[in-house]
Structures are given as structure tokens and as C-alpha cells.
Image: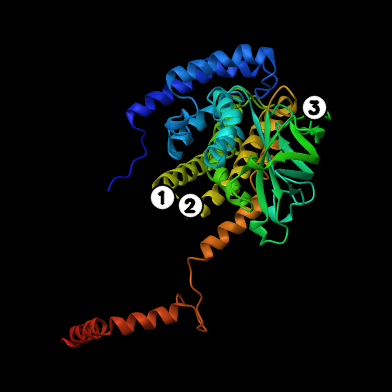
Amino acid sequence: MSWEFETDEVFQAELDWIDAFVRTEVEPVDQLVSDPYDVGDLLRNELIRPLQRAVKQRGLWACHLSPRLGGRGYGQLKLALMNEILGRSSSGPIVFGCQAPDSGNAEILAHFGTEDLKHRYLEPLLDGAIVSCFSMTEPQGGTDPTQFRTRAELDGDHWVVNGEKWFSSNARYAAFLIVMVVTDPDAPPHRRLSALVVPADTPGVEIVRNVGAPGEPVGEGTHAYIRYHDVHVPADHMLGQPGEGFLVAQTRLGGGRIHHAMRTVARVRWAFDAMCQRALSRTTTRGERLADQQMVQEMIADSWIEIEQFRLLVLRTAWKIDRYEDYQLVRADISAVKAAMPKVYHDVAARALQLHGSIGVSNEMPFGDMVIDSFRMGLADGATEIHKVTLARQILGRYEPTEDLFPSYHVPRARHEARERLGEVLERAERTDAAERARP
């Protein structure tokens, strides 16, 4: 049996290179590029494409993909350790070809797409020439697939799509959208949906408006409110078979949640480092260092504990995915990761903001954005509450109820059962004790 908390030397060398490369080459780009997903931005391309070429030369491009698709076929544990570094930079995932939602979209295109779809969309997506969108959430039903209303009806050799989608990230830059549609409203809830590849320039695809985070100008965000009006999509643009949309979606979500979590670890660690530096650098009105105040020390200690606990949970979950190669067997662990993530993110970012005082709440620091982003992470890929319900059901399924009046762990019952099982030993000990007492 072996149980290690160390990375092998060969892969650690790669992680060291990634860490230095992101720190010296990628993070400065974040200060100059308005949106790393905007492949039409000339400055973005001038800055990011040379970095992408360097990553490809190093052999670290799109490592989540199999070698057949140009990746390294890394398992979830290695990908988690990579994303723990890449998450420090908004441009990092793009530079390494593993950004959401494109990484997941590439996976399902590779698994379910026709050869024509792979040629038209998967190849340029893997090359970093285009970006994509996963259009699932709806205004009235959120991310609950049983509540979706966007319909696709077969008309000859085309599907005709009508409906509305909400929060379709990066739609304004996407070359294509993977749209979740209802193809059989009378089927069981998880067999109603199908997934369609919709070219972004198809007539009838209307971005009603782009939605941003709090503080961004109205209409300037990257999360689109989309209306699909009589959008004609060729029948062979369906991923998988009719009714398999839920299966297609789940193919991309398990690993994606782990990547999100490790990128969150990176962001939270950045906030923690800033908190520690601030505590050592500033004084109170009485001239005492913040670092010497017990309440500040408590904030730092709590933050460190929460980060390390969360990180170990994520890494163990990634290890279990690699070990079992079956997301269903690790479903509870993935839900636990997803449920824990927004709280750790929020609490550490909020403490960092508090310790920075007035500059912490200003737009010259990212802490306010991080606090807001923690709420987004509590909704993306399924709300926290849903994942807690999933986790609880999985856990409770491992236990059996009792029909007895008192539970099996009731102390008088446990003592009686112990006496029944070990009665001879007890009687022998009692006789020996009595004999000893009887001696003059």
C-alpha cells in the first residue's frame, strides 16, 4: 500500500515551468487584454497567440484531450494541479487551451460529433482559432433540464429551434453554440432533451442583450440572453441521438467542476496572500500591526484551514475519478466539491476585502469582484443547494434504517449486547475478582 502527498519529479518539473511561465508571461497580459475570449481583438491575438505557440512547443496544450486529439490525455489529478496555477490568470486557461466552456464542448464534439462537425468546429476549436458557447440555462427554469421550454422540431432534414436561453457565456464571440433543446416533450424528464450544434451566424439566432456582472455597464457583459426564432439546423448537427441531451451534458460537467474548483483555489490563494501581506504591512490607529491583532490572526488561520481542506477534497476527488474512471461512482464527491467551493471563495475574499479597508472595496482591487463571483460559482453548473441534496441522498443511500424502538447505538442496548457476546469472559473476571476479595 502506498499513500503519497507528493507529485512525481517529472510532472513537478512541468508544474514549475507552468508556474514561472504564468507569472512572468501570462499574468501581465491580463492587465492589457479586455477579454481573452475575443478572438477578433487584434491586441489580444498579438499578445496571446505567441504564448499559445510556446505552450504547444512545450507539449502542454489542451492536456485534457487524448493524444489522438492533440492533447496529453492527462487524468483529472494532473489537470487539477495545472488548473491550480492557471486559475491565477484570466488568460491562463486560454493560453493553455483548456478554457471553459470550450474544453467541455471539445470533449462532447469528439465523442458525439460527425466527421463534418469535427472538421468544421472541433479542429479550429482545438487549435485556439475560435471559441464556443454552451447554451443551456433558460430564463424561467434556470439550469433544471426538466423545466426547459426551448423546442426543436424535425422538419424534413432540418431541426427548427424556437425558444430563449439565458446566461449563454461568450455567445458574442462564439463561432458555434451547443444548444440544449426539447425534442420530445412527452418523454420521461431526462429523455426529453437533445443537444444541437448551431452555427452562430444561422438566421434567427438573436442576442437580445449581453449581461454582465454587477458594476459592469449594462449591455457590456459576456453572458448572452438569446432568442432562437425559427432557427433551421441540419439534422446531422445533433450530438448523439434524440433524447440523449442530458447524457451529452453530463459528459462535460464532471471534470469541468473539478477544473473550476482548482482554478478557484488559485484565486482564493491570491486573496489569501494579499491578506497576509496587508496584515504585515499596515498598522492600527494605535500603531500596532494588523498581524498582531488576535481577530486578524483568526481570519488568517480560518482562511488557511478552509483553503487547505477544500484543496485536499478536490485533489482526492480528482484522484478518485482517475482511479475508478466512472463519474457516477464519484458523484457524491463532485457534489461536495461544488457545494463547498462558493463558501470558501466568498469567505476568504470577504476577509481580504475587510483587511484592506477602503481600498479593498474600491475598483482598484479585485476583492469586490471576487465576492460577487463567488455567488456566480454557487450557481454555475448547478446551484449549491441542488448539489447538497444530491450529496445527502448519496450519503443516506449507504445506510439502513432500523425498525427497533431504540437505535442500535443506544448505550443500554450496546451494553447488553456486549454482555451477551462476552459473558463468559465477564463471568470469569467476576469470579476471579470475588476470589481475590475473599482471601484473608
Circle 3: residue type: Glu
Q: Is residue 29 visible?
A: yes
Q: Amino acid at mark 2?
A: Val
On-image quarter of the C terminus: bottom left
Cα distance between the residues tagged 2 and 1: 8 Å
Mark sitting earlier along the chain (3/2): 3
Name the residue at 52% across, 20% down: 22
Left or right relative to 415: residue 206: right
Report the residue marked by disc 3: 220
Total labels: the figure holds 3
Tag 2–tag 1 contact (CB < 8 Å)? yes
Q: Is residue 200 left or right of residue 345?
A: right
Residue for point 34% across, 79% down: 418
**Residue 431, how many percent across, how many down?**
21, 87
Q: Nearer the viewer, residue 204 or 412?
A: 204
Circle 3 Cα neighbour tier, 10 Å, few/some/many (<14 / 14–19 / ≥20) = few
The residue that disc 1 covers is: 324
> In this figure, which residue is indicated by the disc labeled 2?
330
- Amino acid type for the residue under numbered disc 1: Tyr
The residue sitting at 54% across, 38% down in the picture is 107
**Residue at the front extreme, as displayed:** 156
What whole-number distance in Å separates the C-alpha atoms at marks 3 and 2?
38 Å
The Cα atoms of the two marked residues, 3 and 1, are separated by 43 Å
Q: Residues within 10 Å of mark 2 (few under 14, many from 20)?
A: some
Which is more N-terminal, label 1 or label 2? 1
Question: Which corner quadrant of the image does residue 127 belong to?
Answer: top right
